[in-house]
Structures are given as C-alpha cells and as structure tokens.
Amino acid sequence: MSMTVEKKGAVQNGIKRAVFAGLAIILQILMIYFIYFRLETRLTWIANIITILAVLLVLYIYGRHETASVKMPWLIIISAFPILGVFLYLMVGLNKGTKDMRNRYKALDDALLPLLPANDAELQRLSAKNIGVANQSRYIRDYAKYPVYNNTDVVFYGDGADGFKAQLEELKKAEQFIFMEYHAIEDGRSFEPLHAILKEKAASGVDVRLFYDYVGSMGFIGNSFITKMEKDGIKCRVFNPMNPVLNFFVNNRDHRKITVIDGKVGFTGGYNLADEYFHVTEPYGHWLDTGIRLEGDAVKSLTVAFLENWNAIRDDDSDDKDYSKFLPDVPYEAKEKGYVQPYADSPLDDEHVGENVYMNVLRNAKKYAWFITPYLIITEEMNSAFAMAAKSGVDVRVITPGIPDKKIIYSVTRSYYAGLARNGVRIFEYTPGFCHAKQSVSDDEVATCGTINLDFRSLYHHFENGAFMYDYQAVRDMKCMFDETFTKCREVTEEYRTGRSRFLRIKQLILRLFAPLM
C-alpha cells in the first residue's frame, strides 16, 4: 500500500526537522570551534586553558567505573581534537542527560518502584529450586528494582506477526486502559487495524495512551501523527524530540516495546509497530522477530516501566497523580508455576542491567547458551564472558543477520566474529534475511526476551526492557525456535576462525575502536 500525500508530507517534514536540528547542532559546534581558533591566535593562554580542561576530562574518563572498550575511543578523540572531542563527549559519551532530567527520573522511580511487590517469598522458593537462577533474580530485584513473580503465564511468539495478531485480539477486550510504548511506529497497513481498535476503545471511555521515540519513528511518521491520534481520543506523546540546540540528552533514545491492557495482560519483545516487522514489506529479506505475552501479576512491572517514561519526558504535560489505579491486584491463578521477571534498564544510572543479565546467563550456563541479536558490538567484559563459557565446555552460539539493515554496523558486527570463534563460540548468520529478535536461552531452563540488543546502543545508551524467565514452556518453545532457526543459517565459525586478510583486519580494528560511538 502506497502512502498518501499527507503521510508522505508528514514524514518528510519530520525528517527535515531532524536534519535541520542535526545541522544546527553541528553549526553550533563548528562556530565554537572557529571562535576558539580565532581567539587562540590572539590569546595563547586560551589554548593552555583548553589543553588543561581536555587533560582533566581525560583523567575524569579514565577514572570512571566503565569498561576500557568505552573509555579508549574518547581518550583518543579528546587527546587529538580537544574542543570537538569535549563537545562530542558531552553529547554522546557522557550518557547521563541533564541534571534536571536525572532528577526527574529519580523522583518518578522513587514514587513508582516501591509500588511493586517485594515478593521475598517467591525469591526464597526460587532459591530452593535453583540457587544460580535465584542469584540472577536477586540481582535484577536489588539493582533494577523489579521483583520476580511466580503467578504469571507466559506465551512465546516465534514470529512478530503472530505476537501482533495476539495483541490485537487482547486490545479488543480492554475496559480500563491501554498503554503502548514503542521505539518506532509507522502509520501504514499494519497500523490500520490497531488504530481502529484504539479509536473505538478511546470513544468508549478507555484511557488509551500511545508513546513513541522521535528518532526511531521519524522515517515513518511526522508531527501530524500526534494531532491525528488526539483527534481520535488517543493520548499521544513523543520521546525526546530533536531540537536545533545543543542537547546533552539527544543520544539517549527510548528503545522499549511495551503493551499493557488493564494491568491484566502485557506484551513485549523485539518488534515495533511498522510494516516491515510483520512481513507486509520486506526491505531486508525475511524479517525474524519474536515476542512474549504475559498474563498475571508480572504485568505490573511492564506498567511501571511504561509510566516511568510517559511521565518523565516532558515537564509541560500533566503527570499522573495516582499510579495505584494502574496497578490493580487482579485475581489470577497461573496455569504454570514458572518464574518470570520483567525489568527495565535506564542509561541515566551506572548499572548496566541488560549487559549484566546476559553475562549472568553465560556464567550460569551448564550445557548451552544461545543468543540471537541484530547487532553484535560488545565490551571486552562481555567478550570474555562468551569466551569463558565456551572454553568451559558450554555450547555457546550467536545468530546474527545474513542481510544487514545498516552496512557499517554490519561490518562492526562481523569484526567480533574472529575473536569469539577462536575461543570456541559458534557464529551463525540468518540467510533468509534480517533477524531483529533479541533473546537468549540456556539449558532448557532460563531465557530472556525483550528489546536489548548485544550492542553499545542498547547496553549503554538506550532506555530498554526485557524479561527473564525460568521453568516455563515458553523457554522450551524458545529453544525449539532456535533449533529451527539454525537450519536456516549459515555457520561462519570456521571461516572467521582461520584467518582474515591484513586489509580487513586493519579496517575492522578501526571500526572496533569507534564502535562505542555508533
């Protein structure tokens, strides 16, 4: 289905605004750079001050509690180009937003997270069954503040289209509220039936909220999308719009994918609300994506993750005053007695929850640990975790795309193959197209599914969410999905283990050096 003139105009205006904002920011940096050099020729002491400031910033970065993989590129850039490096670091590397934004999120988290149950009894029962899994859950509870639940059913969808179809059916049942938060939304064919349901529910008095990331959606929709939604009674907000001024929060994007219906049912996974995720269009071959459906107590955690970003992003909108009405104690008796722990990750703190959960999966694995990710750009710590698991005899495998959506990022992804392969990790490329799923499974017992890629953007810069699962049929279904997917992949382990050309090595070294900036 072709886009209407209005839709094309809206998207083009959104892209133009983003381009204009980007150019304006670059011009501001260049202007400061130009002024500095003009003054430097007249006032040599300015150059000395800038040099001292650059040295102090280098020392600050060196002393931060971060991996060397993140520090090294900044140390090189700031040393070589002090003024430019300082501004790039403030915009991209500092990764903490403004003080006001951090305070705003802290105040919201202080109000929201205590509303979740502690579930100490559930954690104790889990400890009695599997202490290693319980330690993972304890970490998520203590450092991400999201508890583990034992009264929730989980359904796994090995195809994003199946998950979206299930979502539509559940949305039709909504009576109180609908919360939807996605990195990318496209006003296309797939969105039409969803829009019709949301419009109908809003007209019937349901509190319908739609939230999307500005950068993630700017190739799909423009500002007129909000007007269209609000005309139909759908409350709509956009995360962190780009503005033509220096913005030290611009690098932090909302990558979460959450749907909550009445606090009873929730969905999350890798897919956004756009045609390419559901095979309506296939710009990169067959699109492989996955998701899960939660029903029961654990939906509360998805609700809290949504309310955090919805209320945080703009101080000129009315915040919710009563969060408890969105966290009802719904009578429910789960059919399965597994353990599930939805969690969210924020770039505004020093705890890299998404990365640590993945590394704990590797550390606790006894037989196998399999991962699928669209991008593979990892720290030395995670690289070591993969290597140590494989060297210990664990069957460690990673599936990446066979057809890339971003060629430079794809080259960086492939630059990690050789080191992993030499240490026993098996690498597979999904030949039918692009795999966008973000998940892992281990030992037929534990699994993760959510929005968190194995790359610096997801692990360090974006607002993300995921779910850790233990002892569910969904875990075993996920394992079957991996088994089937391997048959559609080309294993490239030996190809990368045995050697690369000298030119390719140099190219990959350069790309790897600046991987944290991508």
Image (spheres, helix red, strand yellow):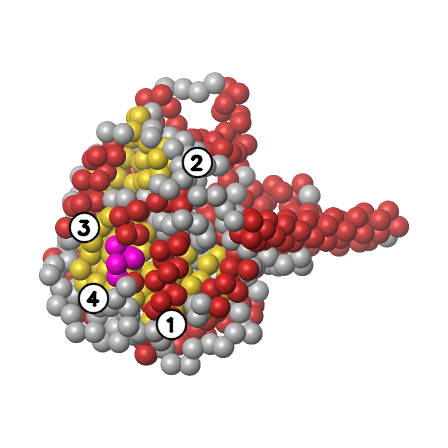
Sequence-wise, which precedes: disc 3 or disc 2?
Answer: 2
Q: Residue furthest bottom?
A: 321
The residue located at (61%, 41%) in the rendering is: 76
Tag 1 secondary structure: helix
Sequence-wise, which precedes: disc 4 or disc 2?
Answer: 2
Is residue 169 found inside the magenta-colored segment of the image? yes
Q: Quote the CA–CA distance across marks 1 and 3.
A: 35 Å
Horizontally, is 374 left or right of 291 in the view?
right
User: Is the C-beta separation of discs 4 and 2 under 8 Å?
Assistant: no
Q: Residue furthest right?
A: 42
Point out residue 516 in the picture as x, y percentages from the top left corner.
51, 44
Horizontally, is 136 left or right of 455 in the view?
left
Q: Quote the CA–CA distance across marks 4 and 2.
A: 37 Å
- Under mark 3, the amino acid is Ala
Q: Quote the CA–CA distance across marks 1 and 2.
A: 36 Å
Sequence-wise, which precedes: disc 4 or disc 3?
Answer: 4
In the image, the segment drawn in magenta is 166-170
User: Is the C-beta separation of discs 4 and 3 under 8 Å?
Assistant: no
Q: Is residue 146 visible?
A: no
The residue located at (35%, 56%) in the rendering is: 193
Point out residue 478 in the picture as x, y percentages from the top left corner.
21, 44
Q: Quote the CA–CA distance across marks 3 and 2.
A: 30 Å
Q: Which mark is residue 296?
A: 4
